[in-house]
Image (cartoon, rainbow, N blue to C red):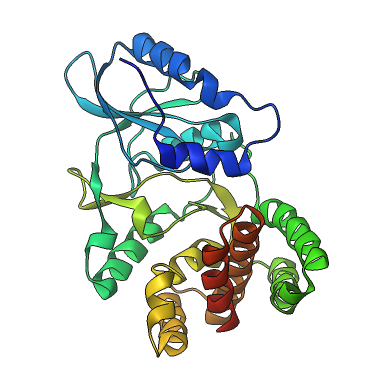
Amino acid sequence: MVFEPPQRLVRALGETAPDGDDWLEKLPEAAQRAVALRELTVERVQVPGGRSSLVLLVRTAGGTPAVLKLAPGRARPEAERAALAHWAGRGAVQLLDPVSSEGALLLERLHPDVSVRSLPEAKALLEAAGTLRRLWVEPPADFVFETVAERTGRQAEAMRARARAEPEVAALVDPALAAREELLAAPPEHRLLHGTFRQSKVLAGERMPWLAVGPDPVVGECAFDLARLVRDRVEDLIAQPSGAATTRRRVKRLAESLDVDQDRLRGWTLFRAVESGVRAGRVGRPRDAELLLEFAAWL
């Protein structure tokens, strides 16, 4: 079987690939090796799939439905493996195979086309928040994950550079960077976080109704993780005449439901929205940049 990467993956990796990166060119051969090593039968490539990995629906030698995920090194697949192993299926997809090879992960099969986004908005937020709560545990001692300070430090440098090049975005970048500095001064806890949590990362399962997938794990305070969920369905929020008020109510409701400080959640939501908006503008997605920066202005 020929493993052609979906166009969504090709476009997304093309936005971030460093010069000389040949992961996509080598992907078909790497997928063949990963399948053969685990004696898997491939059913199909998941389309449209994700933005950072190739996802194959497979069956094990014993006939068990599973998923084989292959990701480039810059997507930190070994950190994902370590986090999934630590969660051991509690709130997250189960890791089925400890074998490590070429960024490949063998995972339990969920329902890839059914996420909590299929639910009405209020119910979707409730189910997503409940799933996220189960992931906030003490990090393992035997794996050093990136910290929130380290990850956002890299992002902050890119934001400063963009603000210098385009002074009109400085009005949002400056308060976002100030919020980051204040938040990092005294974090209330250090937990293992999903890192890129949103409604589309919560899929229907058999073991449990909803399970998280696709972490980019990081260690830090819970408000950082929850901040990405605040802006879910941002295009719908922007389209509402009461979008700003709805956003503020969402911050309050999510903070109260998960025992997170409301001001800290607002601060991290501001930083993450501005960072995503700046990055979208940098890689040529002006519409996404406009939506995210308008959302950030409400905070």
- Total marks drawn? 0
Residue 254, given in percent of the width and then of the height, sits at: 41, 75
Left or right: where does residue 287 sit relative to residue 174? left
In the image shown, does 233 or 111 lie closer to the viewer? 233
Residue 267, given in percent of the width and then of the height, sits at: 61, 75
Give the answer, above or below, for where 211 lies relative to 248: above
In the image shown, does 94 or 285 lie closer to the viewer? 285
**Which quadrant of the figure has residue 253?**
bottom left
Picture quarter with the C terminus: bottom right
| Residue sitting at x 34%, y 42% | 48
In the image shown, does 50 or 98 lie closer to the viewer? 50
Left or right: where does residue 177 sit relative to residue 291? right
Give the answer, above or below, for where 274 lies relative to 67: below
Left or right: where does residue 28 sit relative to residue 169? left
In the image shown, does 232 or 105 lie closer to the viewer? 232
Picture quarter with the N terminus: top left
Residue 154, given in percent of the width and then of the height, sits at: 73, 52
Q: Is residue 81 visible?
A: yes
- Please identify the residue farthest to the right as the structure is shown: 164
Left or right: where does residue 100 sit relative to residue 114? right
Residue 265, given in percent of the width and then of the height, sits at: 54, 74
Q: Is residue 257 visible?
A: no
Give the answer, above or below, for where 234 lies relative to 10: below
| Residue sitting at x 41%, y 42% | 50
| Residue sitting at x 52%, y 45% | 216
| Residue sitting at x 38%, y 10% | 37
Give the answer, above or below, for where 163 lies relative to 219: below
